[in-house]
Amino acid sequence: PQHLGQSGRGPAGDGGQFGDADAVPTDLGQACRILAEHGDGAVPVAGGTFFMGHRDELFSDVTAIVNLKHLGLSYIRLESDRLRLGATTTLGEILRSTVTASGPFRVLAETIRELNIPEVRNAATIGGNVCNASPAGDTLVPLLVLDAEAELASKPDGAVNTRRVPLFEFFAGPGRTVRRPDELLVAIRVPLPPAGRFGRFFKFGTRPALDISAISIGIAGVRDGPVLRDVRVAFGAVAPVPMRAVATE
């Protein structure tokens, strides 16, 4: 597919006319409009690491590649009741942030540190990681134990609307989510946990720092003497989706 706006035309054969703003949207409304127009044919792109190693025929149905890097979605914000991660925030930015360096969100930074490939960390985004929906996606496990939710934006009636989906309900299968074709993931929201909450991440593989996990495990809870309360347990690479272990909890 052609990148919209490079030639002033849409994908080969459609005859449509598109301007540069459509190729690289600068506001959320423009991006949502492109997604609505192209449906399943649109591929939102930020870091682009998903494309590495894929053959061209895997993208034969793609009609639009939408650059998300100019939408202002790269940020890490500690708000009054939550941590908010913009969808195009890179894994490297999360790792280096003082917000995730210690305390209850440290489990996310520790997980990213396990991915000891700086070139990938500095390009891959948290939104792309979530929407890629790999059963072995490492960051998905700590996000699950942190009770994260996805914030999705669309523009069905002329105004940008948002909805939130708990992350444990977001994944529908390998590479599949409940995101509609006209929706864009704009942020990951993580509620501020209560005092005393902690989390840990464990990854097992032939070379854990480089390989896809054979299994990954996340656990979080609130210490209450010898007891853990409000426990969350999640697994990666053991099922078609990253999963909460509700019975174990």
Image (spheres, helix red, strand yellow):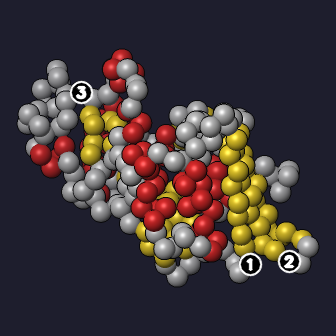
Determine the CA span between mark 2 and mark 3.
56 Å
Q: Is residue 118 visible?
A: yes
Graded by Cα atoms within 10 Å as few (under 14), some (14 to 19) or many (20 or more), the crowding at tag 3 reads some
Q: Amino acid at mark 2?
A: Asp
Q: Position of residue 141 (x, y in %)?
A: 64, 51
In the displayed structure image, the side of residue 41 where residue 202 appears, left or right: right
- Residue visible at 33% across and 31% down in the picture: 41
**What residue occupies the far top of the structure in this picture?**
57
In the displayed structure image, the side of residue 141 where residue 42 appears, left or right: left
Write down the residue under mark 3: 1
Callout 3 secondary element: loop
Relative vertical location of residue 80 with respect to residue 110 in this rendering, above or below: below
As drawn, the label of residue 61 is: none
Write down the residue under mark 2: 224
Quadrant position of residue 177:
top right
Earlier along the polypeptide chain: callout 1 or callout 3?
A: 3
Earlier along the polypeptide chain: callout 2 or callout 3?
A: 3
Callout 2 secondary element: strand
Graded by Cα atoms within 10 Å as few (under 14), some (14 to 19) or many (20 or more), the crowding at tag 1 reads few
In the displayed structure image, the side of residue 34 where residue 133 appears, left or right: right
Q: Amino acid at mark 1?
A: Gly
Q: Amino acid at mark 3?
A: Pro
Viewer-nearest of discs 1 and 3: 1
Write down the residue under mark 1: 196
Relative vertical location of residue 23 with respect to residue 52 in this rendering, above or below: below
